Image (cartoon, helix red, strand yellow):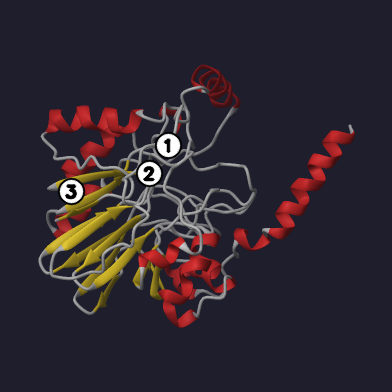
């Protein structure tokens, strides 16, 4: 009884100390939210009949899977990362596109002399409570001093507000060296609570387009959900992003189930040079909002992508599959569909 009471007190103190991590609920006066085609007056919804509920039968099956796979969810030893990943990242130097995967869904992309950072989640815990959802041992992590290695960031791109994509600790460490934050509708409320200048925040609806010098940003659809606290789901929009630069196109899926939106994006904006697509944290029970690896490769085919970088893996265990499985399955399917897959370690850089 006493041990339980102490544990509860520790939990409550942790939540109080880390209250900022929860962010904020968007104000009801945000007219752009009310004008959004996938906002039903109360919350955002996925078009079509997308079921994200968990009934007793699903929970029972998950319990069985947990017992079966619990020893395979995390690497048994230190995760291998690029040997030079703690060195100073090179500054953007030329016309080429340089891509550095930082693990999970965090990707640093240099478009000529512009440096963009997608879904920067670079701290230890993808949770408001320390010790929950801890990053793999030896996975690439940045404290506030390491973040300086990234240099000046011209723009941060956010796909949605889940803790493994929008991280208070990382954003707080970066905010004074970032010019612009491009986020889906409602996500700006979190950033404003975290003392980011409102003038730096650009909120977007699906299909909104923005220009930043010679870069073109397009906020594109995805099939997912949002929320950072119990009982407050889907108050902010989720999205994917397309960046066009001097005839090249780079696509970032964020989190998404497989849907017709990939084909629609290709039809509207043409073939993709690099598709950074979710490949991890999946399950048959929630494949409508998280792609299976085979669907990741199929999405790359729908986008007519020249290169596929599988992301959303090699950092956290958020689902009941072996930690190594996402890339293994994606590689097999990529060979079948003749899709060129970029297989790199966290911290490695490649050029388009």
Identify the disc placed on residue 281: 1
Residue 197 in the image: above or below residue 300: below
Q: Secondary structure at mark 3?
A: loop
Q: Which residue is mark 2?
A: 312
Drawn side of residue 120 relative to residue 227, left or right = left
Secondary structure at numbered mark 2: loop
CB under 8 Å between discs 1 and 3: no
**For discs 3 and 2, the disc positioned in front in the rendered view:** 2
Residue at image x 31%, y 69%? 208
Real-space Cα separation, disc 1 to disc 3, in angstroms: 22 Å
How far across and how far down the image is residue 163, in percent?
52, 52
Residue 188 spot, x, y in % from top left? 49, 70
Please rate how many residues cluster around mark 3, counting C-alpha atoms within 10 Å: few if below 14, some from 14 to 19, many from 20.
Answer: many
From this view, report whether residue 278 is shown above or below residue 143: above
In contact (CB < 8 Å): disc 3 and disc 2: no
Residue tagged 3: 303
> Which mark is first along the chain, 2 or 1?
1
Q: Residues within 10 Å of mark 2 (few under 14, many from 20)?
A: many
Q: Is residue 35 visible?
A: yes
At a point 55% along the width and 33% down the height, the residue shown is: 54
SS at mark 1 in the image: loop
How dense is the environment of label 1, judged by Cα within 10 Å: few (below 14), some, or many (20 and up)? many
Decide if residue 184 is in sight here: no
Q: Nearer the viewer, residue 296 or 70?
A: 70
- The numbered mark, 1 or 3, whose residue comes first in the sequence reads 1
Query: Residue visible at 46% across and 51% down?
Result: 141
């Amino acid at each position: 009884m006493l041990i339980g009471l102490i544990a509860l007190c520790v939990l409550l103190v942790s939540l109080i100390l880390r209250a900022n991590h929860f962010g904020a609920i968007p104000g009801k006066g945000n007219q752009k939210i009310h004008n959004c085609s996938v906002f039903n007056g109360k919350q955002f919804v996925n078009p079509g009949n997308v079921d994200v509920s968990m009934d007793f039968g699903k929970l029972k099956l998950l319990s069985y899977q947990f017992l079966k796979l619990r020893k395979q969810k995390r690497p048994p030893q230190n995760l291998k990362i690029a040997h030079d990943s703690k060195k100073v990242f090179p500054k953007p130097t030329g016309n080429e596109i340089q891509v550095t995967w930082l693990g999970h869904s965090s990707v640093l992309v240099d478009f000529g002399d512009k440096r963009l950072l997608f879904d920067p989640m670079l701290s230890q815990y993808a949770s408001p409570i320390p010790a929950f959802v801890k990053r793999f041992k030896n996975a690439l992590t940045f404290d506030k001093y390491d973040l300086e290695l990234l240099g000046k960031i011209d723009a941060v791109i956010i796909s949605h507000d889940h803790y493994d994509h929008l991280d208070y600790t990382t954003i707080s460490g970066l905010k004074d060296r970032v010019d612009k934050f491009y986020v889906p509708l409602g996500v700006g409320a979190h950033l404003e609570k975290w003392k980011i200048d409102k003038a730096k925040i650009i909120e977007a609806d699906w299909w909104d387009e923005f220009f930043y010098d010679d870069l073109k940003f397009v906020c594109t659809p995805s099939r997912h959900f949002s929320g950072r606290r119990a009982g407050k789901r889907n108050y902010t929009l989720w999205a994917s992003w397309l960046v066009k630069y001097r005839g090249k196109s780079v696509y970032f899926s964020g989190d998404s189930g497989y849907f017709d939106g990939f084909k629609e994006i290709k039809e509207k904006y043409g073939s993709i040079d690099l598709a950074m697509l979710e490949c991890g944290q999946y399950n048959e029970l929630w494949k409508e909002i998280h792609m299976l690896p085979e669907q990741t490769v199929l999405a790359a085919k729908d986008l007519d992508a020249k290169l596929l970088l599988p992301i959303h893996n090699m950092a956290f265990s958020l689902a009941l599959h072996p930690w190594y499985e996402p890339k293994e399955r994606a590689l097999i399917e990529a060979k079948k569909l003749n899709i060129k897959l970029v297989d790199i370690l966290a911290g490695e850089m490649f050029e388009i």
